[in-house]
Image (cartoon, helix red, strand yellow):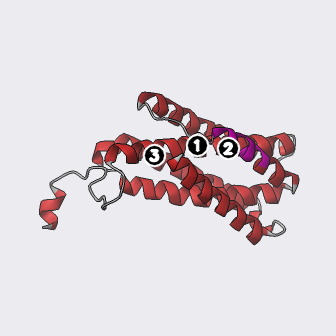
Amino acid sequence: MTEEKSKHPKRTGDNRLPGDPDRETLIKRMIRVDHAGEYGAARIYEGQLAVLGKQPVGDTIRHMAEQEQKHLDAFERLIVERRVRPTVLTPVWHAAGFALGAASAALGERAAMACTVAVEEVIEEHYAHQAEQLGDDESELREMIEEFRAEELEHKDTGLEHDAESAPGYRLLSEAVKAGSRAAIWLSTRY
């Protein structure tokens, strides 16, 4: 049976359960939420740069922001190509992303990096789950998501290298940011 299965390429949605969205809906939701997430991430870094841009850590944040912008540009292309409706929550993520970035940076470099670590941990898990769901029929999308996931892990590692875990109230800040990130994913997938 295993040998027989391996002869057939895996298709996106093959392992759907009753009540799960169909293949097209699943892919549109992925693109919608990833576009929203990359938009929010870009805004977080804009907020951090508004506060810490002239500090020595500014170049590090700028590098991460440039990678997030590349991710956002890719999903903006997919939104158009695949005719996916963006989330209606974009104005919320516009304000919330910038506010989170600026507020974490106002608490200091370590807090800004703690915010980065928390967001990237959630995004890494999210992208890994998406990559598992995508079949060979969506290999380009899967490869793009895996590439972006690797860069998100790089951002997490950068945050850890900048003493994120030494931020005052690290655990509380981290858990709050993770909870907010998970809620944003859930909402943006659907709305």
Picture residue at 73% right of the left edge, 47% below the top: 96
Indicate the quadrant where residue 120 lies: bottom right
Q: Residues within 10 Å of mark 2 (few under 14, many from 20)?
A: many
Find numbered disc 1 in the image and state the secondary structure of the residue it sits on.
helix
Image quadrant where one finds the N terminus: bottom left
Q: Is residue 77 left or right of residue 16?
A: right
Viewer-proximal residue among 60 and 37: 37
Q: Amino acid at mark 1?
A: Ala
- Check residue 59 for magenta coloring: no
Q: Which residue is mark 3?
A: 29
Q: Amino acid at mark 3?
A: Arg
Q: Position of residue 143 (x, y in %)?
A: 41, 45
Q: Which residue is mark 2?
A: 93
Disc 1 + disc 3, Cβ < 8 Å: no
Tell me the distance, in whole angstroms, between the alpha carbons under discs 3 and 2.
17 Å
Can residue 49 be seen in the rendering of this structure?
A: yes
